[in-house]
Amino acid sequence: GGIGDLTSVDNLLNRRLITPGDSSQGRLIGSMEDGTMPTSGSLSNEQILIVKTWIDLGFAEDTPPSGPGIDGSPLQKEALTILQTHCFSCHGPSNGSGGVSNILDVQHLIDSKLIVPGDPSQGPLMGSIYDSSMPTGYNLSPEDIKTLEDWITTDVDPNAQTNLPPPEEVKPTFSSISKLILVPKCVACHGPQRADEGIRVDTYDFVMRGDLVKVNDAADSELLKSVEDGEMPPQEDGYQPLTSKEVLAIRDWINSGALNN
């Protein structure tokens, strides 16, 4: 059908068959979900989930796809899930903030000396966590830090293809939006340590100040307008633009009354 090589990431991008970070966009997943492709029979839900997760995580040709049935130690899976939750939005497959990319690629973490297997006190990954410079705007819990330490000390395996769960899906509630969007992607520049243009989004009260949110009027709310036009989060600082689902969650939350829920 003129589609070309489906195993070429460049071809998938050039023909807009996939949209990095948002599997709901593009014809590839749509044709799988509606059963029109492959013509030889429908893919299983697990197979579709593997492809969707690969796209939602930003994808990379040298990164093994995440999905059911892929082996990996429980400790490494838990450690990488922490990095996925708290670090991936700024340090994804390419153009990562501060020159740090591919945060979920274990071999890359070792080769770039971000971690030193056997010694969590070495390497800038844990160093930035210990000195509270990362994640920007907040600290990991002691439990998460202990998990990362135990993993680096005893269980780093660059050859294992770890089965990461799909990222938690954002909901149109303030708690979900704060956890999955505002804290990891906005608080670094709009939080207690730094408040560009006097804007803070680290608490509900700050979010509701000024014109940032106009209750029941998302179209006239600066928060929505800034993410819809791609102005925020700033891509020049290594952030990925919000997905259509994330933008929709913010819009629906505001139009539903912008509750502290």
Image: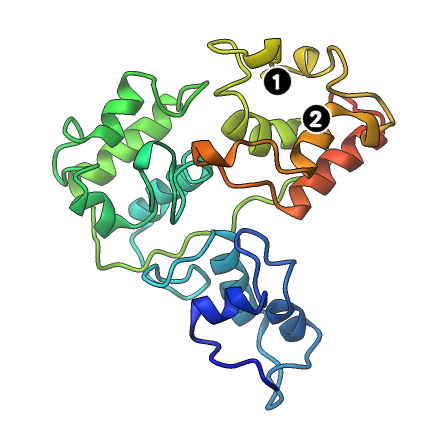
Q: Is residue 76 visible?
A: yes
> Is 216 displayed left or right of 166 in the figure?
right
- The crowd level at tag 2 (other Cα within 10 Å; few <14, some 14-19, many 20+) is many
Q: Is residue 261 visible?
A: no
Coloration mode: rainbow
Residue displayed at 59% across by 31% down: 232
- Disc 2 on helix, strand or loop? helix
- Residue 167 location in percent, x, y? 52, 47
Residue displayed at 47% across by 52% down: 58
Quadrant of the image containing the N terminus? bottom right
* Image quadrant where residue 226 sits: top right
| Amino acid marked by disc 2 | Leu
Q: Which mark is residue 57?
A: none
Residue displayed at 19% across by 37% down: 115
Residue marked by disc 1: 201
| 2 vs 1, front mark | 2
- Residue 34 location in percent, x, y? 71, 74
Residue marked by disc 2: 223
Q: Tell which residue pokes out farthest to the right in this image.
A: 216
- Disc 1 on helix, strand or loop? loop
